[in-house]
Every structure is written in structure tokens, then in C-alpha cells.
Image (tube, rainbow, N blue to C red):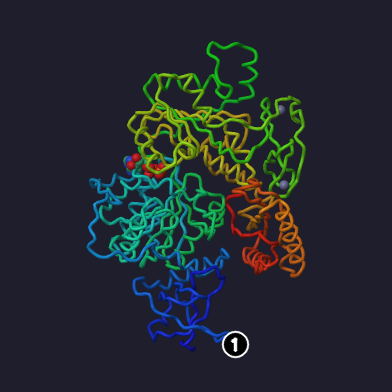
Amino acid sequence: MSEELLRIAVDAPISGALTYLNGTGEEAANRGQSVLVPLGKRKARGVVLGPGKLEPNIKLKAIQARIENRPFIPEDHLSWLEWLAEYYLYPIGQVTALAFPPLDQPERKRKSHKAPVVKSVAAKPAPKLTQEQAQVVEDIGKINDFSVHLLHGVTGSGKTEVYLQLLERVIERGESGLVLVPEISLTPQLLDRFSARFGEKIAVLHSHLTEREKTEQWWAAVKGEKKILVGARSALFCPLEKIGLIILDEEHESSFKQDEKLKYHARDSAIMRAKFANCPIVLGSATPSLESWQRAKEGRYHLHRMTHRVENRALPQVEVIDLREERRARRDQTMEVPLPFWLSSHLFEMMKETFARQEQVALFLNRRGIAQTAFCGDCGHTFECPNCAISLTVHGHGHLVCHYCDYTDRLGEKCPQCQSSEVQPLGLGTELVEEDMRKLFPELSIARADRDEIHSREALEQLISDVENRKIDLLIGTQMIAKGLDFPGLTLVGLVLADVGFSLPDFRASERSFQLLTQVSGRSGRHSDDPGKVVIQSYNPDHPAILFTQSHDYQGFAEHELVTRQELNYPPYSRLAMFRIQGPTLQRLDQASELLQHRAQTLRQSRSEYEKIQVLGPAPAPLAKLRGKFRGQMLVKCPDAMVLRAFCRQLMGDSSWLPKGASAQIDVDPINML
Ligand code: ADP
Ligand code: ZN
Ligand code: ZN
């Protein structure tokens, strides 16, 4: 083994490691050491991976220096980074670069006058655990080696308290804990609960900190000054030593998947991180992803359940309003107050009653305004692809397109189900709901939360505190406010049109809808002795996502949905990779798509194990044009993840097959299908 030559993961878009001469003496030869190397005309940073091999005909350059103000990357962390690069087909040097903070190490004794990142709050003693909580803490706490625990606990069952108690034990053993939550849940409410228990021992990382703040928090965690790191998905890259436990809350959240650059899924990556660190990991949710649920069923994960809310509070009562009947009834009678077309008289009455009791109401409409779907206003019929069981998307001139397989159909004048001529693209959004509500309830204080209205974290936090302090009577919003929030005065939740989510062009549409309906319902009546109320309005009142939400039956939903997944060979029964193609013009995109399709066909026939591979598309992406680029996509399915990756790597090759100006990217285990 020659230590004269070293393999370096250089921070540059080069897929593998580069070989350099070790010009700096013995110490630089250690795996995990950061070094500065020449790269073309510039200098780049990199991390030593191990001894290199002599490559004939290549003139090797020498490492310039060790980088002293970066910590050594521990072996388990470095192995994990190598796994990420391999699994997500991303340049190793750009993966290892993520393990460092944005700025160099802060000088000591720099006094800052800014508000602290984690504010101190009065210590609060732990409540007496419910029997279910105590059981889970005991069962998980027994195992200190690598093991994956799925904690399925209904909304309000006290999952956070379970995390806190498990973390206490980790600190007692002198180890550290890593807690990952969706960015949007990283609110002061959550941090206060951690600080009330652990005081000064908390470090925090999320995207709204300044670079200096991030750097300081990062070092405090790496040096072990802080014992618990709470963060959004990227906190996973912090090279903590002696991790004793990883917790990932709301494990079903799609925001754990990064959509650009390194397209990693924080849940799957965290499991691998725990594996390399040989520690347990807890995945928590009221609505686990079907992937995790299936693994728990197969016995690969330990399943723990909490089926009751704390203090025996009831789960909310869910009523479903059939909008088809509502329309029929409305045609036959004239109303005293003309209601907006989207509002049923029942929901209206319940809102009035709730306001009369001085309680709060929230209305949700998950209208993201991206893919336009067509829909019959009389019977609620939607148009589906016969091959893929996902919704067809409306394009200009009444064309319906499937964004997986490129199936097309025409949007006729009449509904194929009820012959009504009320077929129309869906045209309802939160803004319209707000306008109508201001007319109906001019005396109320109304606020709206969606991406158009709430731009910053501060604005969202202000809104949350206004609702908490009862300055707002009626909150209207998208999924932005569906999750994790805990408002004592909120006792009625209305879902304006549950169907919106059913018809997104995504095979997970039904699962997402169930998750959203359940999470949204879970906001109601969290602190009242009377059960909270939920009203779901829909044209498809028999949709499984609605029925199983109504009966609070996660397991029933999961079993039902898994059957469809198996029939159509979707995850968790197969693995997916998505090729995303872009071109400056439609013509270039088509050219690239054809080349890709041709390459895929040829490659499939080249090896017998590739016969298991199924290729769908290329088809236009649901967002067919984005930021001036034309977009297409091709979906690759395979039961075997290793075969799938090998196929994708070969298919992409060195990208030189792409026409000028076009580009292609691979997304392994894609979540965002738009
Ligand atoms: P989940 O995350 O499961 O929806 P939370 O952890 O937010 O639930 O807990 C819901 C509420 O119950 C919180 O206000 C929390 O402080 C409270 N709580 C948790 N455990 C207990 C307990 N054992 N006794 C009383 N209250 C509790
Ligand atoms: Zn119809
Ligand atoms: Zn299709």
C-alpha cells in the first residue's frame, strides 16, 4: 500500500475521487483529513479517502496543504458519505463538502448581541407518561445497537414526550442525539419544548439561520458542547461523534426528500447513518409512509403503537358532506343567504355555531395550483390514465395527457359518467375562499396562509402566535398550516374540497390525501374535553382516503392502498428512478427524449438482469415548462435497487449523447413526480 498516492474526494462536479501525490508528509495520509489540492487552474478543497493507485499516462499533481480549521471526519460518517454518493449517483467530492459548515471556524470570544438561536425557557418537569408512552420508551430504550423503530402514534398521543425521554437516557450515557424534523415544523413551539427539558444542551440547524449562526451551532455540536442537535434534513450531514440515537419526526413528510443537487431522502439516509454509527433510529408519525409501514410488517423495523390521545381526549368527529347531493339540493331550493358554490350549508351552519361559542375555525384547501385537472361539477368524475392510475392533466385545446406514460385523450363536451356538460378545469383556490368568507363574515378576523401570502418564516411565526392568542377567528390555508400545529381554541376544521389532492398526477396522490386529511383533522379539539369537529366536503365521499380518515383507521387505509401499489408495481413493491430531461426548446427536448428512449431500449436488451426493468415514457413533465426550460421525464421501475442503479448509471453514461443545450438528471427514489 503506497501512501505516496492518495484518493481525494474533491469538491467539484466529478463523479469519482481523484488521485494526488502526497506532498505534505505523513499526517495528510489519514482518511477523513481535509486538504487543499490544485484542480485545473484553481485550488479546491477535498477530503482524503485512502491510498491511491498509480495511473499510467497521467501526470499527477501534489496536495498543497492540509486544512487545519476543519475537523477530521470520523470513519462512520465518511463511510456514510461514500454510501450517499454511490446510492444517489452524485459526485463524491460534492457530497463530502456538505459535511462542513458554510464559514470557517469562528474566532473565540466573539460576543454577539443578537438574539440567541435557542432561547432559554423555564425548565418544565416531565409529565407522568401515559401507559402507552411508558411502554414505548421502555421497548425502544432496551436496544442500543442499530435498529429501526417505527412509532405509529395518533395525533396528540404524545410522541414528542417519548422522544424527550429517550434522549434523556442518551445524554446520561454520555452520547449525543440527533433530531430531524421537517423545516416547517421547526417552530419556536417545538424548540421551546426541547429547551424546557434540556436547557443549554441544544444546538439547532435550519435554513433560516445566518451562515455565522449555522457555523457556530455546527461547531458546538461537533465539539460535543451541545448534546442534542435538532435540525431540518441537512443537519444529518453534521459529523457528530458518538451518536447514541437518531429521531426523525413526521417520517412520512415528502419534504425530507431534497429535490435538487444531491437528491437524497433524509429518512432513508438517516437509517443508513444510524447503521454506520450502530445506533437506534426512531421514525415517528401518525400516518407512516407505506414504505416504512411495509418494512415494519415484514419485521425489518420494530413497530410501536400509541392509539390514544393523552389524558384520554377523544379523536375528532369527522363528518363527510357529499357535494353532488349538495348541488342537487341547491338547484331545487332558493336560499336565504346565497352561499358560495364551494360551501355546503352544513359547514356554514357549523361555522356559525363555532364562532358563536367564541371558538376558532380553520378551512383547508390544498390547491397548489400546478397541474390542472379536469373534473365534472355535477358528479365529480375525474379523468384517469388507464395504464398508470394517475390523473390526466389538462393541456391547451382540451388535450388530456398522462405524465408517466404519455397516454393522451380528448376532453369531450360531456362528462362520460353522467353526461352533464359541467366538465371544467378545476378553478378554486384559497384566495377565492378568503374573498367569499370576508363577504359572509365581515365582522370576523380572517387570515390566510399559503405560499402567496406567507413568504418568510417570521410571517408564519407571527401568524401562528396570532392564532394562539385568539387574534384570529378564521384561518384559511393550504397544507402549510396542516401539520404539527397545536391551537387550543381550534375546534372546527373544514376541508373545502378533499378531491383536489386525489387527482394530482402522482401515484402517491391517495396516500398524500389520507395523510393530509388525517393530519388536518388532528388539528381540531386537541385541548378540549369535547371532541373537535371536522367537516370534509367532497364529490367522492366514498374515496378510501376519506372513509379511512373518518374511521381513524390508518392500518385499514394502508392495507387497501398496498393492494393497488402491488398491482401496478409501485413502491414499496418496486424501486423507482426518474430521469429528468430539460431542453432550451421543445425540439431539443424531443430530440433528447428520443435519444434517451433509444438508449434505454438498447441497454435493456444488453443484459439478462435488465429484463426486470420497466421503462415508462419519456413523457412531458406535469410542469412542462419551468423557468424557460422545457421539461420531460422518464420513469424506470425495477424490483431490485442494485440493478436499477446499475442500469441508470449506464444509461446516463458520461452525458455526451445529449444534444447541445439539453441536460439530464437522475432522481433515485423520486418523491416529487411533478
Ligand atoms: P403528537 O406529537 O403525538 O401529536 P404531542 O407530543 O404534541 O403529540 O403531545 C400533545 C400534547 O399532550 C402536548 O401539549 C403535550 O405537552 C401533551 N402531553 C404529552 N404527554 C403527556 C402526558 N403524559 N400527560 C399529559 N400531557 C401530555
Ligand atoms: Zn359527471
Ligand atoms: Zn399513463
Looking at the image, can residue 82 be seen?
A: no
- Horizontal side of 186 relative to 665 (left or right) equals left
How packed is label 1: few (under 14 Cα within 10 Å), some, or many (20 or more)? few
Disc 1 on helix, strand or loop? loop
Residue 16, x across and y down, in percent: 56, 73
Residue 589 visible, this angle = yes
Pick whichever, 245 or 451, lies toward us.
451
Side of 103 where 305 appears, left or right? right
| Residue type of the residue flagged with mark 1 | Pro
Q: Where does the image place residue 481, in percent across and percent down from the top left? A: 45, 38
Where does ligand 2 appear, by image quarter? top right
Between residues 208 and 568, which one lies in front from this camera angle?
A: 208
Does residue 383 appear left or right of residue 496 in this picture? right
Image point (36%, 67%), residue name: 241
The residue drawn where x is 58% and y is 30% is 428
The location of residue 404, given as percent across then percent down, is 69, 49
Question: Is 581 above or below relative to 379?
Answer: below
Whether label 1 lies within 8 Å of ligand 3 gets the answer no
Residue corresponding to mark 1: 56
Q: Position of residue 657 (x, y in %)?
A: 70, 66
Task: Count the labels in the image.
Answer: 1
Task: Reply above or below: 535 against 352.
Answer: below
